[in-house]
Amino acid sequence: MKNRRLIIALLISCLLLCCTAQAVTLRITVVDEETYDAVASASVYVDGAYVGSTASDGTYSYVHSGNDDLYLKVVRTGYRNWVDYVDYDTTRVQVDMIREDEGLTFELYDAGTLQPIVGAVVRVEGEDYSDSEVTASDGSADFSVKSGESYSVEIRASGYYDLSKTVQMENSARVVQYWLFSNDLLAVQVRDSETSTPLKGAEVYVDSAPAGVTDADGRLQLHLERAKRYSLKVTAADYQTYQENCYFETDDVLLQVALSKSVYQVSITAFNEATKPIEGAEVYLNGTLQGKTNQYGRFALSDLHAGTYQIMVRASGYEDWSETRQITGVGEDIVAELDYDRASVTIRAEGSDRKAVADAVVVIDGQVVGVTDSLGCLKTALVTNKVYAVTAARDGYRNISVNAEIPLGTTEFTVPLVMERDFGSWVLVAGVGVVAVVLLAGVLVVRRRRAGQNKGKSRGRDSL
């Protein structure tokens, strides 16, 4: 019994050893067919099942029983699939991957008009590859090239500059777009000479003929034959005219034109409210003092560039005058009429006893301006350098009128008004009433005395 068990154990061990001995390791190496560079991340399939991917050195090891041949498949983007049978006892296999053909399309456009360019010749060259095509009605040309390869491209079209480029293909189709520049194209760009700001609407003339106006970027495209001389003129509102004879070489593509602002002479005349000239008034331009007016109230600004300016005139005793003015012409005469300063004027009404008179109505130059407060005062703002008729009225007081002159440059001023009490008709009526009362009282006294005397005489007679 023991011998039988021992024999069975020996048979099982031999069987296991035999099976282990038959296991086979297949080393797969994946390379590019043309460059023999290792192809990493290639997917490996055995008998239709995915088993792994190649490492950075393009290798992958697969262990199998070694009993049957293997159906091996290798897949990598940008390459054609590799499929083949591998003998069961094979330990090494090299997979040469062939690059997949990919579509390479060129689209060509005119840089000025943005229209497709028809009939351009496109030549593509690479390692073991050379082909040429002509662009169709949509400006395109198609090529079939290898993925992952680098190609040189030469483009030629009648009336355009030649173009040379290099295109690197990836692992998918590619569309490449190019601008072609006309070989007679010349761009003119017009700017302000001081600020470099592009000038829109500048008019360009070539040989005295209008060629167009500049756009928002100050540019205008011209088609001019090279190796020739042209008379070029550029004009813009409020700018000095640019005019020059220019010779354009074959490689000239851009002409920069800087225009200077036109200069004008402007005079400023300062008057007051009485239309009298103000001498010594200060003239400011954009906040900077330029000078003072002469005895005739005039000041001249010479060589003033066209543009928008903030003009201010300032004089003692007057309110500032300011105005924003667009200077666009020669010989402008700006009139600045300055108003007198206003002073804070206090009208103070009081009686002859120096006590404040409240609620007095104040009239200035025929216009009621208010009534005095409990302190007998009324404040108002009045223009200086002027004489005013000031009147105050209050029941029980005589009206009072004075002429008050507010000196030029004064900021505060007080007009005192002393009002006397009015002893008019009501005082007379009151006096008459008092007299009447006194007379009536006297008459009554006399009557009483007479009545007393009469009674005394009667008593005397009766006694007799």
Image: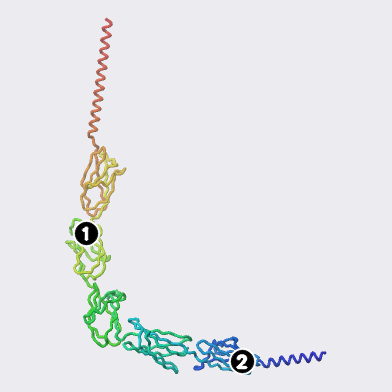
Calculate the distance from the C-alpha at mark 2 to the C-alpha at mark 1.
108 Å
- Which residue in the structure is indicated by mark 1? 337
Looking at the rendering, which quadrant does residue 191 occupy?
A: bottom left
Indicate the amino acid at tag 1. Glu
Indicate the amino acid at tag 2. Leu
Query: Height in image: 114 above or below 445?
Result: below
- Report the quarter where the N terminus lies: bottom right
Check disc 1: other Cα within 10 Å, few if <14, some if 14-19, many if 20+.
many
- Which residue in the structure is indicated by mark 2? 70
- Report the quarter where the C terminus lies: top left
The kind of secondary structure element at disc 1 is: strand
The kind of secondary structure element at disc 2 is: strand
Image coordinates for residue 431, horizontal then vertical, percent:
24, 29
Residue under the image location 23 percent in, 86 percent down: 229
Image coordinates for residue 408, horizontal then vertical, percent:
22, 54
Q: Is residue 51 left or right of residue 185?
A: right
Residue under the image location 44 percent in, 93 percent down: 129
